[in-house]
Amino acid sequence: MKNKNLFLLTIIALFLSSVSFSQIIEKGYETRNLGSNFDNAKEILCSGNASSSGSRYRLNVVFSSSNNLSIGKLYKFIDDDDRVRYLFISSLRSEPFGDRDSFRESQLTFQNIFCDSDGDGIPNDDDNCPNEAGPASNNGCPTKPDLAFVTSKMTISSQCVNDGNCDSNFEDSLDNGEFHSLPFQGREISIRPVVKNIGNASSSATKLKFYISENKTYESRNDSEINEINIPSRNPNAEYQGSIVNITWFDVNNTSIIQQGSSGYILLRIIDQGESDLSNNLIALPIILNRQRNSIGIFPLNRFTSNNKEMSIINVYNIQGMPVTQKNIYTKEDETLLIQSLPKGFYIIKNGDKTYKVAK
């Protein structure tokens, strides 16, 4: 009986030993030793430079369960000699280090640090803009104004094909690719701008400026300012309808940017006041400058593709072959304008080696 009891006790002891052993887990960690001063370690952690600061420190940790150290977090570590280090946990190895000491899980204490780099009271982990102060209502990002054109409410009055009018709605005119004519002593281009603050903060007073440009991009060194209007401070979602701005042939011609018969752009540009989005601050309105008094017409932008500036002589004949006119031209645009200026009828056009017929 005594031997039987001894056998049972041995079996129980072995079982308890195997259960205890299965719960002990050793794991290896790569860390950065950020020193023994908590405030310094916190400052490094909140700066976002913890993974590249301090010195490399490798250790094994023995757990009594399936716990882990949290990657990317800071722990206070007390070694067997009671020395304190603050360790930033970089990564977990697939197996423990074979040449490193092992320490108990209880020797490392998680540091619940509240990082707020911009001082707005929102933890960096919950802050969409951790380096710029902003309210919680905007996810920690600063509120900014954003002035944008409301092209659907803007109007334009200008001359197009055969003395007709371009679309009076500015947005429709842009969408339709209308080309606005500025004939000599002819009709002006009249624009009534509408601007709205679509941002989440009030805007400061600023200006809307008008420029003449060879292309759609604003270039301070190359473009010439011809007009401006004031835009007062606007609250979020508030609009401002500006006064009508009239642009004449002389306004454009005096800049010497666009040659007679050539195409270009009127740029409408809202002057930046620390806005969150600048992509909606510029509009490019296609125009053509013409010395003649009558209208020029609308030409799609993809028609004006010639960059050839060499002079050529174009001859125009009537259907009987009699000369009608002769003109020096520099671009394809010049040739198109000449044809558009001809009265109704049938013509033979000769430009160098090219000859073709036109019916108007």
Image: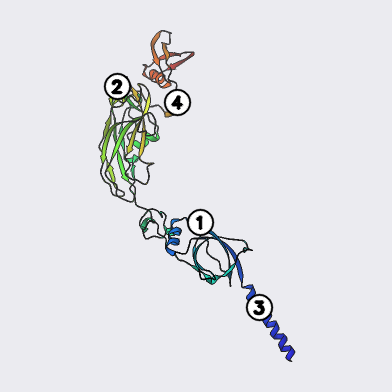
Q: Identify the residue shown where x is 69% and y is 85%.
A: 9
1 or 2: mark nearer the eye? 1
Q: Identify the residue shown where x is 39% and y is 60%.
A: 122
Which amino acid, by three-letter code, is at mark 3? Ser
What is the CA distance from the residue labelled 4 to the residue labelled 3? 87 Å
Q: Name the spot of residue 229 as percent of width and height, x first.
A: 26, 37
The tag on residue 17 is: 3
The tag on residue 184 is: 2
2 or 3: mark nearer the eye? 3
Q: Earlier in the sequence, mark 2 or mark 3?
A: 3
What is the CA distance from the residue labelled 2 to the residue labelled 3? 104 Å
Instruction: List the single residue furthest toward the front.
Output: 81
The residue under label 4 is 305
The answer to whether residue 81 is above or below residue 140 is below
The tag on residue 51 is: 1
What is the CA distance from the residue labelled 1 to the residue labelled 2? 68 Å
